[in-house]
Image (tube, helix red, strand yellow):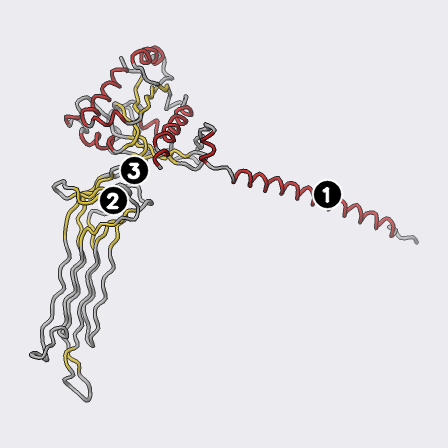
Amino acid sequence: MQPIFKWQSISAVYRVIRNCNTVQKNIYQSKRIRIISSFLYKSFHSTHQIHEHEHVASALRNTKPKSDRDTLQYFVDMKQVRVQGGKGGDGAISFLQLWVNERAGPDGGDGGHGGHVIFQVSADVKDLSTVSSVLEAESGEDGHNKDCFGKNAKHNIIKVPVGTIVRDTEGTILADLDEEGMMYIAARGGAGGHGNAFFKSNMNQSPKISEYGAEGESKQYVLEVRSMAHVGLIGLPNAGKSTLLRAISRARPKVASYPFTTLRPHIGMIQYDDYEQIAVADLPGLIPDSHKNKGLGITFLKHAERCAALLFIVDLTQEEPWTHFEILQYEISQFNDKLNDRPMIIIANKVDLPEAKENLKLLKEKIDLPIIPISAKMGTNVATLLKEIRKLYDLHFRKNE
């Protein structure tokens, strides 16, 4: 009986399989070379070179779904705190007793020093929400016998954001922490007390006295963040500031049909495809005579003062919307004349509604400034707004870096 396969046919099949493996290996290597070359080509492109060719980075689209509930977190830019330094350890009263000498002399050690409360600037902290209202440092350890000193307490280092201003309760500025790594000792810890070994002298060989540890400093401060965001949203109540912040970032401020839904500022981050991030603040609504402390008054205007650029949002569904922009400019100029000199963008919101079309034409006739019509709720022209914000950021912020 003859075998089914011959040696010649087996070798031919083996050659075919080997050729197929070689072809697959070459294809894999060619793909790998293309991938590596494309990676190397991209890695040699810097952001600075891209901007030289007048290319504006595109904002990234949020692929992860957001929660439907309103966020309970908000930006804390001012807080009053009470700081307490650690108490120093008490000195010990002790006498050394040996089997050959029952009166070997005093050996009470000193107490350890109490810890300080220190404010340290960190770029990882964005607001004062992580800072407690009462800040205390640890106390030093008491002294022991055999001349053992107590251990010094660790300092309580509190992280604060860049641009934090430290004031006393009377409003006097004590420190301006504007660089990362800067430190300010808010409360010093008490010194440790001396033990009876410290008081030994020729006149008194067996002192029976020691010192109590000193109390730490107790003070009150008002912490204020000077710069809260790159861009601030300014507008009258119900102009659509919170809705716009929801549309361009992952922030979830409260949105409702009644005025003053935003009582405290919210911060949202706009992310771009070149890994740049721009902070946008949703500020409380502004009303006429806010500079006279009506409504939220001075509290609102302080928030606007800490933003480097301003976005004026005008509701196109209201009668004579150009007067709203004039009110906004007048109020911030009465508070600080330099606010009108900052870079700004005028946004005409709610362009999707029928009554907004005619008001948009009148607004462009009354105001001789560039206007970006958008619909924050429907997403109309939001991409154009994000590009304009990036151009503003590249022009006024990156130039100073």
Q: Which residue is mark 2?
A: 177
| Residue 163 position by quadrant | top left
> Label 2 sits on what residue type?
Leu
Q: Position of residue 146 (x, y in %)?
A: 20, 77
Cα separation between marks 1 and 3: 60 Å
Q: Tell me the element at label 3.
A: loop
Q: Please tell me which residue is depicted at 45% across the width and 35% down the height of the picture.
A: 47
Where does the image place residue 261, in percent across and percent down from the top left? 26, 29
Looking at the image, tell me whether mark 2 or mark 1 is earlier in sequence order. Answer: 1
State the residue at coordinates (34%, 35%). Answer: 400
**How packed is label 2: few (under 14 Cα within 10 Å), some, or many (20 or more)?**
many
Q: Percent x, y for residue 182?
A: 27, 48
Mark 2 lies on a secondary structure that is: strand
Amino acid identity at mark 3 = Leu
Which tag is nearer the camera, tag 2 or tag 1? 2
Number of residues whose C-alpha sits closer than 10 Å to that of mark 3, classed few (under 14), some (14–19) or many (20 or more): few
Numbered circle sitting on residue 72? 3
**Which quadrant would residue 24 be assigned to in this image?**
top right
Kindly identify which residue carries mark 1: 23
Can you say which quadrant of the picture contains the N terminus? Answer: bottom right
Observer-side mark, 1 or 3, equals: 1
Report, in whole angstroms, how far the alpha carbon at label 2 lies from the one at label 1.
64 Å
Q: Quadrant of residue 385?
A: top left
Disc 1 element: helix
Left or right of 311? Residue 135 is: left
> Residue at 22% across / 43% down in the picture?
176
Looking at numbered disc 1 in the image, what kind of residue is underneath it? Val
Measured as percent of width and height from the top left, residue 236 is found at 25, 23
Q: Is residue 359 above or below residue 135?
A: above
Tag 3 near tag 2, CB within 8 Å:
no
